[in-house]
Every structure is written in C-alpha cells, then in structure tokens.
Amino acid sequence: MDENVRPLVSGDAVDLEERKIESALRPRTLAEFGGQRRVSEQLELVLHAARGRNRAPDHVLLSGPPGLGKTTLAMIIASEMSAPLRVTSGPAIQHAGDLAAILSGLSEGEVLFLDEIHRMSRPAEELLYMAMEDFRVDVIVGKGPGATAIPLEIPPFTLVGATTRAGLLPGPLRDRFGFTGHLEFYDAPELEKIVNRSADLLEVDITPEGAAEIASRSRGTPRIANRLLRRVRDYAEVRADGIITLALSKAALELYEVDRMGLDRLDRSVLDALCRRFGGGPVGLSTLAVAVGEERETVEEVAEPFLVRSGYLARTPRGRVATPAAWRHLGLNVPKGAGFADTLFDTDNE
Ligand SMILES: Nc1ncnc2c1ncn2[C@@H]1O[C@H](COP(=O)(O)OP(=O)(O)OP(=O)(O)O)[C@@H](O)[C@H]1O
C-alpha cells in the first residue's frame, strides 16, 4: 500500500509501540472477550468439554474480516486450555517441509495458530490433512524415484486456522475442522464497551458520548476502535486537557479524515473512483484496484466488506457497482438508471 495514501482506519502497518499497545489491549479470557456472543458461547462449550475430558479440543477454524478478534481468540483458546501457543501463517509456509518442521516440534496439547490459512501452498495443505486427522506426517527423505516417506507421529494438538476468505478453503480442509466460527462485525454498543475497556486500560478519561462517537466511526471493528481511541487520545492530550468528550472525538476524527459513517480515505477513494471514473460501474475488481492505486486484495479484503455491509457497494456478476447511497454519500446526484438492477446478486465474480 502506498504510504502517502495509507488510511488511518484500514491500514495494517503500525509501529512497534502501537503493536505493543494493541497487544496490551487484547482480552485474555473468553469472559473478557466482548461481542461475538454466539461464537463465544459455542467455543466456551467446546473448550469446557475438552478440559473435562483432559484432551486437546477439536481443530477450530475462525473466519471473518480483519481486526474482529481471530488472533485474540486463538490466544484465548490456548490460555483457557493452559496450553502453549505457536503462531505461524499461510504465506510463511511455502513448502510442505516448513510445516512438517513446525508440526514435529509441537508439544502435547499445544495450540498451533495458522493465520491466513487460505494462503498456504497446496503440498503443505495436503500434509496438514494427515496431521489434523491422524496426528501423523510423512516426512519425505531423498529426491526423485528414490524418495521415501517416513511416517512421523506428532502429539495431539489443536490447530486454530484463521482466514478472511473461508470460501477459498478447499472442502477437504474445511471439513477437518471440528468447530467453525464466523466472526461478524460488532454493533455499536459492543464497540462502545470495547472502547471503554481500552480507555480504562490506557488510563484515559472518556465520557460515554465520547466513547459512543468513536465506536460509531469504527466500522464494526475492534482493532479500528482501539486505533481511533489512541489517535483521539493523542489529540486530547496535545490540544485539550486529556479528557475525551463528544466534541473532542468529533474534532479529532475529522482531522484524521474518518467520516461520520466510519469511512476513511481508502473507502472514499474506492467509491469516488467507482462513481466519478466508472459512472457507478459495473467495474471489475482489478480495474478498480488499479484506479485507486491499491492491491486487489486490499480493496477486496479491507475496504469492500465494510462498503458492502454499509450498503454503498454491491458485488454483481459483472463487477462492482455503486449503490444510490454511495452517490449520496459523496454528495453527488444519483444518475438515472445507473445499472443497479444487478445489485441483488451478491457474488465474488468480476
Ligand atoms: N471481542 C473483543 N473485545 C475486545 N477487544 C477486541 C475484541 N476483538 C478484537 N479486539 C481487539 O482488536 C485488536 C485486533 O484483534 P485481532 O488481532 O484478534 O484481530 P484478527 O481478526 O486476528 O485480525 P487479522 O485478521 O487482521 O489478524 C486486538 O488488539 C484486540 O485487542
């Protein structure tokens, strides 16, 4: 992503200090984990039962847009099971051997968190099938026709896979998870609680209205709520007396270009390109991404879920389409007959 246009709310690069704060704000137990009531309750049951049987819980697949708590839940699973946690990610596992090395180093009951599991290489994926089901991997020794497979037992472990794209996971992989939880965007009261909890941990004074304002502009995402809180705190400390009130939240978020619907620069530039350059669409995702100078994945995974959910953008079989709400949000007149007929087809196809 281009540094100059990195938006405040959807950018994923934070400096070390910010990372430390983010980590300090992570809930440590399911009881502390606000929202996602259904997934939380289901998971609580799975973990409770596993503890009762003194066995590693079934493998868990967590899906949903970035920043909703997948990593946090993986950490909670490990801590609720009093088990060690090992963290890796799909892009880091390019060869089956990389995965074999990780798996063979696991201790009994360990939780292996595999982020972005949909980006793992195919050979590694096939190795994972056997490990998940039989707690065994075949280590290939040698090359070519002389290569032999040596079976290697691995201790029972719990895989926690996380993905923003559950649909991209092959069926056989998905089927090997005993529990699948889909994380939804948070509603405003849930986010408000998260903002208040974080403010408490950061020892920041905040009024209920100030917290509500930050929550309402956080795109249903705790990571964004926490990040906005930190920026508003900066503003409060530098330009005021340190107390986050409604007026102060509004002024700070305006300065950071987060509008009252929670749209940031990236979101607005996607809508802007869609409406002004492509007449509202339909336009293919790749073309749209080039027009806003972003990676296809950034547009699809960072901006679109919120734009679709907020009713500004629709995915149709022929491409992305701006809805009348998008035109209005940009202060533009809605053109007559601007191809909204397809908007009922919510599909990933270009
Ligand atoms: N339910 C929650 N209650 C309180 N804070 C939360 C909750 N969910 C997430 N957070 C906070 O939001 C931040 C982001 O969460 P997390 O890293 O778990 O998201 P993620 O879904 O793994 O994102 P990504 O897919 O980008 O890795 C964390 O710092 C955590 O403090």
Image (tube, rainbow, N blue to C red):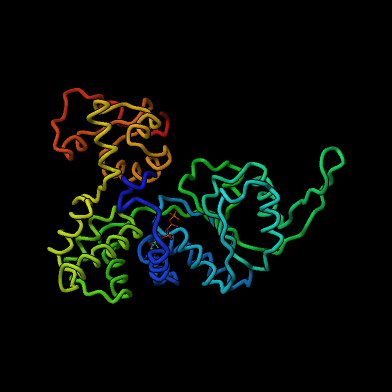
Q: In the rendered view, tell whether residue 81 sits above or below residue 135.
A: below
Q: In the rendered view, tell whether residue 99 sits above or below residue 249.
A: above
The quadrant the C terminus occupies is: top left
The residue under the point 32% across, 46% down is: 4
* Residue 127 % position (x, y): 69, 48
**Residue closest to the eye, 230 or 319:** 230
Q: Residue furthest front?
A: 4
Q: Is residue 71 left or right of residue 300?
A: right
* Residue 309 % position (x, y): 30, 44
* Residue 349 % position (x, y): 42, 30
The residue under the point 51% across, 40% down is: 168
Q: Is residue 326 left or right of residue 344?
A: left
* Residue 273 % position (x, y): 27, 33
What count of labels does the image hold? 0
Tell me which corner region of the image, top left, top right, bottom left or bottom right, holds residue 295. top left
The quadrant the N terminus occupies is: top left
The residue under the point 61% across, 50% down is: 93
